[in-house]
Image (cartoon, coloured by chain):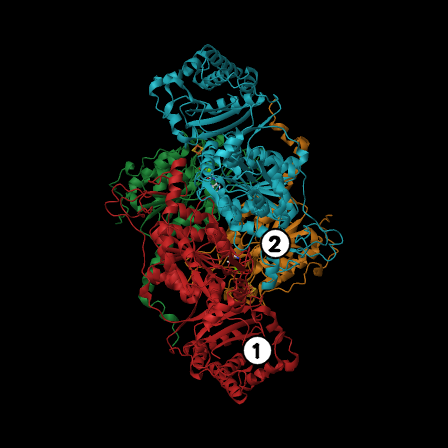
Chain colours: A cyan, B red, C green, D orange
Amino acid sequence: MSDLVIGMAGAGGDGIIAAGESLTVGATLDGYHVIMTKSFGSQIRGGESSCRVRVSATPIFNQGGVLDVAVALNWSDFLKFGAELPVGPRTIVLYDSESHLDPAVLPVEGYSEDRAFSVPITEMARKSGGGDRVKNMVVVGLLTGWLQLAEGPTRKGIRKRFGAKDPAVLAAAEKAFDDGRAYAAANPIAALPGLGASGGAAGTNMLTDGNEMCASAALFSGCTFFGGYPITPSTEIMQFLSREIWKYGGSLLQAEDEIAGIGAAVGASFAGKKSMTATSGPGLSLKTEVLGLASIAELPLVVVNVQRGGPSTGMPTKTEQADLYQSVFSSHGDVLRPVLAPTSVADIFGVTVHAFNIAEEYQTPVILLSDQEIAQRKESVEPFDLSQFPIVSRREPTAEELEHYQRFRLTESSISPISHPGMAGGSYQGAGIEHNEAGSPTASGVMHARMNEKRFHKFAPLYERRDLFLIEGDPQAPLALVSWGSTAGVCREALRLAEDEGLPVKLLVPYLLYPVAEKVYQEFFRGVSAGLLVEQSYQGQLYRILRMVLDLPSGFESCAHSGAIPFQPSEVVDHLRGQAEKLGLLEPAAAAAS
Amino acid sequence: MSDLVIGMAGAGGDGIIAAGESLTVGATLDGYHVIMTKSFGSQIRGGESSCRVRVSATPIFNQGGVLDVAVALNWSDFLKFGAELPVGPRTIVLYDSESHLDPAVLPVEGYSEDRAFSVPITEMARKSGGGDRVKNMVVVGLLTGWLQLAEGPTRKGIRKRFGAKDPAVLAAAEKAFDDGRAYAAANPIAALPGLGASGGAAGTNMLTDGNEMCASAALFSGCTFFGGYPITPSTEIMQFLSREIWKYGGSLLQAEDEIAGIGAAVGASFAGKKSMTATSGPGLSLKTEVLGLASIAELPLVVVNVQRGGPSTGMPTKTEQADLYQSVFSSHGDVLRPVLAPTSVADIFGVTVHAFNIAEEYQTPVILLSDQEIAQRKESVEPFDLSQFPIVSRREPTAEELEHYQRFRLTESSISPISHPGMAGGSYQGAGIEHNEAGSPTASGVMHARMNEKRFHKFAPLYERRDLFLIEGDPQAPLALVSWGSTAGVCREALRLAEDEGLPVKLLVPYLLYPVAEKVYQEFFRGVSAGLLVEQSYQGQLYRILRMVLDLPSGFESCAHSGAIPFQPSEVVDHLRGQAEKLGLLEPAAAAAS
Amino acid sequence: MTTNASQCSSFQINDYRSDLKPIWCPGCGDYGVVTSLYRALAHIGRPPHEIAFVSGIGCSSRIPGYTTAYGFNSVHGRALPIAQGIKLANPELLVLVAGGDGDGFSIGGGHLPHAVRRNMDLTYVVMDNQIYGLTKGQLSPTSHRGVHTVTSPEGSLEEPVNPLLYVLAYGANFVAQGTPADMPGLSAMIEEAIRYPGFAFVNVQSPCVTFGPPEQQLRAHKEGMKSLVSLGHDPTNRVQAMSMAQAYGHELYTGVFYRHPDPPPSYEKLVAERQDHMKATAVPRERLLDRFVQH
Amino acid sequence: MTTNASQCSSFQINDYRSDLKPIWCPGCGDYGVVTSLYRALAHIGRPPHEIAFVSGIGCSSRIPGYTTAYGFNSVHGRALPIAQGIKLANPELLVLVAGGDGDGFSIGGGHLPHAVRRNMDLTYVVMDNQIYGLTKGQLSPTSHRGVHTVTSPEGSLEEPVNPLLYVLAYGANFVAQGTPADMPGLSAMIEEAIRYPGFAFVNVQSPCVTFGPPEQQLRAHKEGMKSLVSLGHDPTNRVQAMSMAQAYGHELYTGVFYRHPDPPPSYEKLVAERQDHMKATAVPRERLLDRFVQH
Ligand SMILES: Cc1ncc(C[n+]2csc(CCOP(=O)(O)OP(=O)(O)O)c2C)c(N)n1
Ligand SMILES: Cc1ncc(C[n+]2csc(CCOP(=O)(O)OP(=O)(O)O)c2C)c(N)n1
Ligand code: SF4
Ligand code: SF4
Ligand SMILES: [Mg+2]
Ligand SMILES: [Mg+2]
């Protein structure tokens, strides 16, 4: 076994998150690919908590599905997480002997009795001298033991975590860890054969989440202003920048609301700086009017929207992909506003840099549509070369152009050189009012038509940006998958599974969601007769948007459901197999594979 | 000639609007069909102004195109209105002799010298004793004279207008009017043969604009709360209600901003009252978040959006149809929010009543998408029977249902009986947070999926509402027109023109824009091979929305352009003719027509 | 359907307490606020279904759900506009509004002056903990200058909002401050605010035990609070009230800062007069369009 | 690129006047405001391109277009947040903000306390005409109680906003009021406000001749205005200033209500210190991700 999903749950104070993090850090240090997600009950603090840690020797792109190993510190808390910690007949179920339950009568559905083990977790913790507080370290010891993870890195992880505290605390934690390992060694579980070597270089991978990666990319892109207002699950972007941006000569304003946040960001852009705001659905709704202002005033701006469950306040801590309509179509009047989406902690860096570059190049607000899953999961990321990302800055007027400067001059590219306060000769009136080339208000329908045309036409080169798409699989395959955001990670794995079973599939992942680069899709769909657009929204929003401008292959269907519960690769493959059967694709494909 | 468009322009103080209004009132009193639109320069007051008055013996649905009669009190002001006062070779051009210009050298393009007449307007005004202030009444006299409109009704209109003022002013106005008529009688213009009898009953028609009609319909529907914030071109709705709503036990709040306006309206609806807000694009953008709240809290609400030119502040006094995307798709998360659009001052009454009924029936915000043209033009409307409009109120829980009341009970129709504060047994928690049937917060993905389903499924009956569509023309026609809002009026006339020249065309006008009632369109498009969706937005927004769910006939195209400059029926017919030619439809169709 | 407020109520505290378990952290000041509110309501004795209780978003804004009133846990910052709509739609209702310092003074701060100057008979209770609780500890508009939070790791650079002074400047006719460190005082104050005809504002220093500043915890309140009565403050003097309010953030004064001794008529009363006076001129519904006929 | 303010300027009024013809009605008070502003700027002598001038929407908000500064006629109510973004992005700029009473105290009223308490070096000029001019005569937040407008045909039921008192309560360090009825006074006041380091607020009673109330016209101003100096007002006393400000709407007091004699450092100064102090700890761009590596 080289790919395992571990899920654990416990009460507030059980430190289940700390256990997951220690394991995650250890596995990362050891060169494994790791993805960790957390989930909490509704209590603000002290309620039940859980985490999922997926560890693999090969690259992974999503949090995985049914648990391989389930750890229940107590059953009532474990069960509260329902579909987030799914147990199946092959799941190894480990639970604290304190529950005094027989493996035959566990209160969870669908498990196998012969794979359920009562483990004296609390007892060991108490014996170790650290008391109930170190139950979590016992768990870490047990797991590293049974999974045959190297001891060193995890211990290092524990020391990192507890080193700063009271030495007695650290000692107790290490003791509990050792006792857990010893127990695992003494009580091997045949069904749990260990993870096998990571194959990765130890001590070189990064470990972080999407929000911090995004904020880092903003700094890398030269962003020197952030204006925003806290909102889950985007706040860590602001929090990261509030520690860092000053160092780069930048500044940050925690504004009184989202409107002021984007207002200040627009102001900073008007003043010539690269500028950003970040929010989630409710905040994006509030920013709508000023977004429209940035479009007509042609000001560069990056707006990060970390999607959560909607509508309205919805489900702040759950992921969903249902803000695409809002991102593309909100704000009144005719507006084209590019929308980009990352698919993982690894690629959000590059996508964020693209967002800044596009904003600057086309003098436009750009929406970076992240989601809670990407934003808040911890993911191990292999180091990459930052110099692969060129940095683009807005085109300023030359001295010559400043001579008879017109801010909104109608040029061939429809992009007009942009000045900023402080630049002699470049004074102009920015406005939300329709204007002529000089920026003066107009009520002329003819000028309005011309300016609308300019504001759309300037994006023409964006439709040719093939680098904003990821294509995988056999280019000739008649089955197609399209997916975006965190769900794209599910489809990347589904593609591998499908290929393994001989299904002729290929995959398109757009980082550029809007405008729809028709040619890229047309080429991709050439020869495709069926397939799926997989996304986490009730309406299947990207599917509908593609239909607006593309004639999709007749068998290409929307595969969409509401958020919070992630898609599983196997689910996608099942659908594909069904389509392949209907089309009579199955035999020859299977033959080809054999 | 039984259908004439008159356009006039003058400086501030010339009273050109008063002239247009006197003519409009007179023609309406006399039983003609009349549409009057106004346009102003950028000065807040005292700048140039213009109006267009279309008078016809047969029903009309739009403001018309190239002027039949142009009146220029001075040329510099006339020319400022450019495309809004288009002059062609058949236009009778009347201008004040004060300009001392020879008819051969008028500063306007495309007119015919033999149809241009210098008229001593100022001279007559001064002679009449009223001075320059009554130039406008001279114009009214001239026009009623040349058009052979009955004298009585227009005089009545003048008396209505000036009766309340100083008697000397009225006397001067009447004298100027008489002098104008006398001049016309003495100097007949052969090319201007008079309008012919109205055919309509005199003294029975209404004359009003879309905003007042809409506000009246709100009162008729039982609306007792309005919360809003002034914005052009919607403010007259609030102004009308601020005079009237109290009489019906209702109340109105001019809020501090649009968010508070819709917030108060949502509160009133929560309290059990029929409630409304009205705005234009920038305001709609601000209301986005609370709109989403109303959707998830399932509260009835009518939101009028009177479209103007966008994006952002755009062109506040010009019409456009580019807020459709915003109306349909704004607010984050998965939301279905019905959108209705009137096409005229006449039908906005019924469409507003439908909006209230749908809001109440489905416990949902509804957007009534009016536009500046409909909202602010004066239109004569034949009286109609108000009893044809049934009034629907929200379904409240019965005594039995109150026993174990659950606000969001999952019923077969997905509509749950709704209580309100004051109702014993009906207490619940309204919220923007995702909730269970009782209204308590949930973070369960399963419950979220179920509630999303409920919030979409409840609209099922709406897809069957054929009464929310207007279909005209030959049901078997292979050419199709679809149009909405004020542009639909253009297409209704285009249909008649096309039929007259033997083109096989039919027309579909949706009052219900969203959700897309697929079956209605599918039936309509049966046998259609080409056609046009005509709308005033750069992107052709309804066309794209239809594509999301419908496979349109391959030759059915978007015919769209930016706002401010209205479509002309002839333009639409030209396009249709082109399509018919391509399809080889022209000969047989012409044959059939002969 | 309406029961008038009476001194001798037939309702008990439990009639106002819902079954929902609060999501609040153990020890959160908001428990004290909701308990004080139950008591105040039990004294007043309006049946729960005649109460509409509106809030925004935040830990504190969960409070309506813990009562048996009709609750509306709306969106962040919009409780006051929604409450005004409810009150105008049905003036018979007892309308309560509550939320946090962020909800009320930051994102919702633009609605406050207008709610105050309209003077509808609403009671607005803010649970002011000088922090954003629900989103886990960001700077709030009432956080002290210099404070270190997750969004001000280098220290805040701004002067805090002074809610008491602001609301007094807006012309509020009832302004008080309490703390759960003095539960009898707090519930009496909330009761008085509810009974006060017109807009009444109660700022509660409600500690956030998880993210709040140390000087802002119950123990510190117990030690430091000073009742305005004990200081000889005259609550009929708005200028003196403003001067006492200047101490916000430095001293914890509890009690009534200002109470207009002669409450002016509320907005909804004026509206009712207008409706009464105009109703005779209403055209019947079926003749609503007659006014447009030209004759 | 920056020229420091100096007593002896090499710029003339016409250097600040643009070619655009104002859309204002003949006689509108805003003409006086823009003229006073030209004068103030000419005295101060910053080159026009070093000035950023932000406004919202309204008749008054057209003002940046009539100057040669970089102007931003943004959206209704959002001038202050935009201006703050500009100032933080480039503290060298002279940043002016202007708009109407509706723009600033109604839809934009939620931004005002926060702009004040942050205390950036901005000058905010409101053209307060007690009416919505651009939209043709609706009730404004500063309209008198009882006033009849197109949206209050039966008379307004609300107490007006008191901008002077509010801004003083928010802690503004420079607060003044002027009128175009006293042009020299107005331009001196605007000049002083611009020179004042930190947030400065000037409320101008700028008559709307077309829709404004009769008591709010130049003639009435000329007759009724009283200078604060003549009344012996001490502009270093905030409490006295608040008490004088109570007369807003009844008396037209002109001049400086409050001027903090010892201006505290502006926000952008504190930011600059922080940047200076932290820049040494910046990781080079190409090593930004090193922090995430586990070793
Ligand atoms: C429009 C919007 N912006 C931001 C948020 C995120 N948010 C939720 S509660 C909150 C602030 C909470 O602070 P406060 O109002 O003081 O309440 P507390 O939790 O401290 O009681 C924020 C920023 C949101 N839900 N909606
Ligand atoms: C979001 C938004 N709401 C409303 C409007 C309409 N509007 C434009 S200006 C204005 C008020 C004007 O009053 P004020 O700010 O006092 O400026 P004045 O015209 O009196 O100078 C309004 C309501 C708008 N443009 N945008
Ligand atoms: S985080 Fe703070 S405010 Fe929120 S429940 Fe916990 S203690 Fe109370
Ligand atoms: S309407 Fe009033 S504020 Fe606007 S320009 Fe005219 S006088 Fe000035
Ligand atoms: Mg708080
Ligand atoms: Mg004004």
D154 relative position to D239: left or right: left
Query: Which dot marks residue B90?
Result: 1
Could you say which is closer to the camera, residue C280 or residue B403? Answer: B403
Does the image show residue B552? Answer: yes
Q: Mark 1 packing: few (<14 Cα in 10 Å), some, or many (20+)?
A: some
Could you say which is closer to the camera, residue B311 or residue A358? Answer: A358
Q: Would you place residue C197 above or below residue B78 in this image?
A: above
Could you say which is closer to the camera, residue C11 or residue B49? Answer: B49
Q: Which chain carries label 2?
A: A
Q: Mark 2 packing: few (<14 Cα in 10 Å), some, or many (20+)?
A: many
Q: What residue type is labelled 1?
A: Arg
**Residue at label 2?**
A455
- Camera-nearest label, 1 or 2: 1
Does the image show residue D119? Answer: no
Q: Is mark 1 within 8 Å of ligand 4?
A: no
Q: Distance between the residues labelled 1 and 2?
A: 37 Å
Task: Count the labels in the image.
Answer: 2
